[in-house]
Image (cartoon, helix red, strand yellow):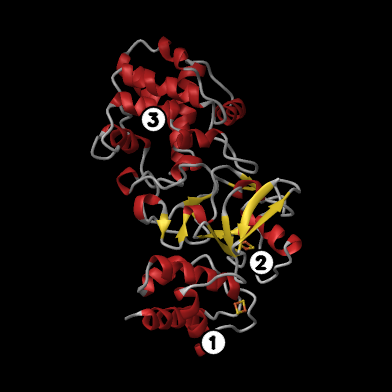
């Protein structure tokens, strides 16, 4: 039995300990905002925050998160999340949207660590989040907008 | 360059195994193939009377581990690690960052865990994501990509490029460091480095005791 916190609520899971966190979130907790893209840490669609840092939930066995705090797109909150939400809707960033919860989780985590990121910071942090619709230019602009909106 | 090393390896093998006997090319190729998967015990080098030659031979044997992609991939000459036995640039693109642990928002721990992680429901060619508690890149001064074994040998002995280690500390590091040890248990779907860490440690220890001589090229 694994006990962890999901979006602020204590949860337990007593299935196969190798079950990826992504499957627990989607299939058992029915939080389907976090997406399955590749299952092998190549696309970033499944990104969540694990104890405050971005983590690919598809390669995170549930057995490894005992006592940890997991935040998904449904639960992410705070100054950076608000700024990202406003910037994202302001620029209409998503195309099909499939990659976007992962993009947003990575973007929020970046702004929490680097409040005023450069283009290089953005490239570095977002390099593992693939967008098949190629919304990369809007993602970058929206992160800059979010950073500006948090100033002062 | 790998081809050249392979030829040198075969030549070395002939020197020890053949000792003047004429081996057929096929049997040489076969021995060389088996040879790449195993390490000769340090004691077997005692038969080389000349200490300097023995020392070089010991390091060349240890070089089968040191120059294996499992080790070299995380000693890159740029800020980006390599991946796989064909040593392609790491995908997704990741970069060195502070302490070789990645950039903010895209650190090693974004994907790598404290253990090798089996992946579920994937193609036969992708079996696990590698992991270790100490997963990180070797510092740039310890870059091995593109270097000859002779150059790596000099580098390992140079405190300015070996993390300020004494030779005793080098032996300890090679024989017992946990991340070095990952090379022998790299997880499903990845070829381990030859031999065992204990055998490798003994080779390095014997190399140091015999004067830590480096190959000429
Ligand atoms: S689904 Fe996890 S990185 Fe692609
Ligand atoms: S918006 Fe379609 S994959 Fe990114």
SS for callout 1: helix
Above or below, comparing residue A118 to residue A96 in the picture: above
Res. A40 visible in picture = no
Residue A141 at x, y = what percent? 44, 83
- Specify the subunit that label 1 lies on: A
SS for callout 3: helix
Residue A43 at x, y = what percent? 59, 65
The crowd level at tag 3 (other Cα within 10 Å; few <14, some 14-19, many 20+) is: some
Image-based side of A30 in relation to B71, left or right: right
Give the residue at x 49% y 79%: A82
Q: Do the numbered discs 3 and 1 sit on residues whose CB atoms are within 8 Å?
A: no
Residue B56 at x, y = what percent? 35, 24
Residue bearing mark 3: B173
Q: Real-space Cα distance between discs 3 and 2?
A: 39 Å
The crowd level at tag 1 (other Cα within 10 Å; few <14, some 14-19, many 20+) is: few
Q: Real-space Cα distance between discs 3 and 1?
A: 52 Å
Q: Which mark is residue A89?
A: 1
Res. B71 visible in picture = yes
């Amino acid at each position: 039995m694994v006990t962890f916190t999901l979006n602020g609520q204590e949860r337990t899971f007593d299935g196969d300990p190798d079950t990826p966190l992504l499957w627990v979130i989607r299939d058992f907790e029915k939080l389907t905002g976090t997406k399955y893209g590749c299952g092998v840490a190549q696309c970033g669609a499944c990104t969540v925050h694990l104890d405050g840092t971005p983590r690919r939930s598809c390669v995170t066995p549930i057995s490894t998160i005992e006592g940890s705090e997991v935040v998904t797109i449904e639960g992410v909150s705070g100054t950076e999340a608000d700024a990202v939400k406003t910037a994202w809707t302001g620029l209409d960033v998503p195309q099909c949207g499939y990659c976007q919860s992962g993009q947003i989780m990575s973007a929020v985590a970046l702004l929490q660590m680097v409040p005023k990121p450069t283009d290089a910071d953005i490239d570095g942090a977002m390099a593992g989040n693939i967008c098949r619709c190629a919304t990369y230019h809007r993602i970058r602009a929206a992160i800059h907008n979010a950073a500006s909106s948090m100033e002062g | 360059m790998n081809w050249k090393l392979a030829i040198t390896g075969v030549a070395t093998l002939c020197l020890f195994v053949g000792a003047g006997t004429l081996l057929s090319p096929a049997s040489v190729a076969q021995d060389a193939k088996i040879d790449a998967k195993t390490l000769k015990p340090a004691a077997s080098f005692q038969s080389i009377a000349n200490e300097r030659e023995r020392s070089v031979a010991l390091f060349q044997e240890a070089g089968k581990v040191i120059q294996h992609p499992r080790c070299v991939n995380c000693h890159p000459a740029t800020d980006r690690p390599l991946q796989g036995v064909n040593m392609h640039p790491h995908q997704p693109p990741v970069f060195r960052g502070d302490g070789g642990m990645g950039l903010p928002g895209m650190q090693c721990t974004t994907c790598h865990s404290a253990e090798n992680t089996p992946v579920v429901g994937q193609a036969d060619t992708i079996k696990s994501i590698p992991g270790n508690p100490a997963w990180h890149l070797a510092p740039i001064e310890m870059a091995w990509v593109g270097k000859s074994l002779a150059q790596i040998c000099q580098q390992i002995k140079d405190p300015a490029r070996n993390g300020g280690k004494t030779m005793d500390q080098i032996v300890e590091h090679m024989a017992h460091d946990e991340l070095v040890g990952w090379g022998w248990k790299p997880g499903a779907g990845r070829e381990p480095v030859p031999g065992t860490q204990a055998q490798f440690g003994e080779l390095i220890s014997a190399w140091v005791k015999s004067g830590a001589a480096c190959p000429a090229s």
